[in-house]
Amino acid sequence: MSLTSSLLIGRSALTASQLAVQVTGDNLANAATPGYHRRVANLAAVRGNIDSRGIYTGRGVQVQSVRRAIDEALEGRLRANSSSLEATLVNEEVLTQIESLTNELGGQGVGNDLEALFNAFSELANNPGASENRALIVEQGVAVAGRLRRLRTDHIELRGALESELRQTVTRANELLNEIATLNSELVASEQGRSEDAALRDQRDVVLGELAQLVDINVVEQASGSVDVHVGSQPIVLGDQNRGLEVRDRVVNGESVAEVRIITSDERITPTGGRIGGLLAQRDGVVQGTIDDIDELTSGLIYEVNRIHSSGRSFPGLTDTIGYLRVAPADQAVSFNDPANTTFAGLAHGPTNGSFTVYVTDSSTGLVTQTEVFVDLDGVDNTGAAGFGDDTTLASLTADLGAIGSVNATITAAGELRLIADAGFEIGFADDTSGALAALGINTFFEGVDGRDIGVRGEIEKNPELIVAGLEPGSNEAALGIAELRDQGVDAFGGVSVLERWRQTTESVAVKTRSAQTATRASQQVQRSLEAQSAAISGVSVDEESINLLNFQRQYQAAAQFISTVDQMTQILLGLV
């Protein structure tokens, strides 16, 4: 090996150690920088030469590359769990809010109001003639109706708040996608297939990490150094192209529903993780499910109470009453059970085949006449063939009622059934096996269809004496039947009582809340573990870097001493010439 080769070896050592010291200094300078990955200078021996004697001699050292210390698979797992964690946090937040809204543990929830209403009917059953009991029933009925309407409104507002947050979150996600596309472009131009631009890659990883908190993503790196980002199988970033995300509204069952779509292709995406996935899941899942439960409870309560109440008589009887159900003009001549009748097809509890009895009382003589009115909804025409041609319609039922002496039946301009007794006469009802009176809102306690419009019938609010206790003065069949709804299973709720049906809803929310809290704690634990693993690989240890700094310093000093020695040898050689 010539002295010149020795000088070149010494120079390579100086250059390599100098670069290694620079890398170590960069690590120390960024020890507290968020998103920074430790740099590693990869040193390798330069391939040697063979001399005339056939001996290989080394040519020094070189820095092959400076790369980030990173485990891409681990980073992918970290992003995936970050998405999962954010979704569980949203889940827990929303369920906690719903549990707070129902407020059953505070003694001021729907269950308590229902208990009070059924207790009031029980008191009426014990003393059917007491006016104060009827006034209490009106008060409790108004409280129940108001509670259910407010509860539904609260959940509608919660759903609206989730959609508002969804829009803001999607807007932020779109900003991050733009950043990723820009960084892809800059990184490809910077690296040009050569060495790694660690600073740009770190910056891009920080943005990807924030995006993963918003939506569950899959990241695929290309040979050029850029990355493609997918949600499920749908790409949202391809190289330097951001395909874009936005929220668009679509009308479903008369209500506006927000959906997340890709701007360039109008494809709908349904994330399962991240804050966006959590917001979508909770809005369409537990929040909408609770709204549906409130409507189911309310419509069932209205129907079951009205079914019993409408089959009794008030004392005094009715002289002028209007049903609350508004039947569209096009549906008034269509049978109740015809699917083409949109008014009745939309009811949770519509009329069925049966009949009811109309009582007409002459107030001056006390004479009572009874007329049975049939509600034909068997779906069979007069030839015995399947069809709705001969089944009862609002128009035909109005005609049948109007044919009863001293009863005038009309359909109002709004589509409601109205019954007016002749002067000196009163109207009452009994034995409604069809449910037609309850569906039309005649002689009922409640009015409305579900949680949107439930209320105590206006006539009863004005005159509590119209509350039905039984079939005869002093009897209590109706009041007792309504009071028993507290514990008695009913068909509207699949054989469970009204109170039990509401308990099922609140208990389901409570169980889901506890489960969400457990899932959040578990996901947080996994996140801490993954972050610790990532820090062990990519984090900067000041102690370790200080040792590296000393090593590279000694290497530099040794290389300088080596060059100095070779230089002295060269001077000696020249002196001999």
Image (cartoon, rainbow, N blue to C red):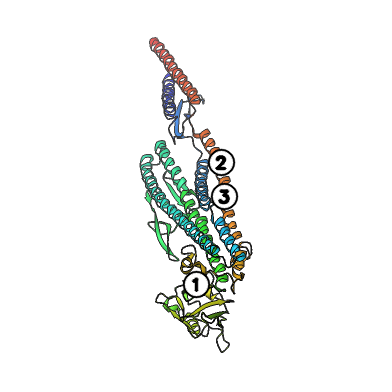
* Sequence-wise first label, 2 or 1: 1
Q: Is residue 540 above or below residue 428?
A: above
Q: Nearer the viewer, residue 134 or 434?
A: 134
Disc 1 packing (10 Å; few <14; some 14–19; many ≥20): many
Contact? badges 2 and 1 (CB < 8 Å): no
Which residue matches tag 3? 105
As drawn, the label of residue 441 is 1
Tell me the amino acid under the disc marked 1. Answer: Gly
Tell me the amino acid under the disc marked 3. Answer: Leu
Quarter of the image for the C terminus: give it: top left
Which residue matches tag 2? 526
Residue at disc 3, secondary structure: loop
| Residues at marks 3 and 2, CA–CA distance in whole angstroms | 33 Å
Which of label 2 and label 1 is nearer to you? Answer: 1
Q: Nearer the viewer, residue 334 or 68?
A: 334
Tell me the amino acid under the disc marked 2. Answer: Val
Residue 1 shows in this picture: no
Disc 2 packing (10 Å; few <14; some 14–19; many ≥20): some
Disc 3 packing (10 Å; few <14; some 14–19; many ≥20): few
Can you name the residue that lies furthest to the bottom here?
383
Location of residue 366 in the rendering, given as x and y in whole percent from the top left corner: 55, 80
Location of residue 236 in the rendering, given as x and y in whole percent from the top left corner: 42, 52
Q: Nearer the viewer, residue 227 or 304?
A: 304
Q: Is residue 493 above or below residue 97?
A: below
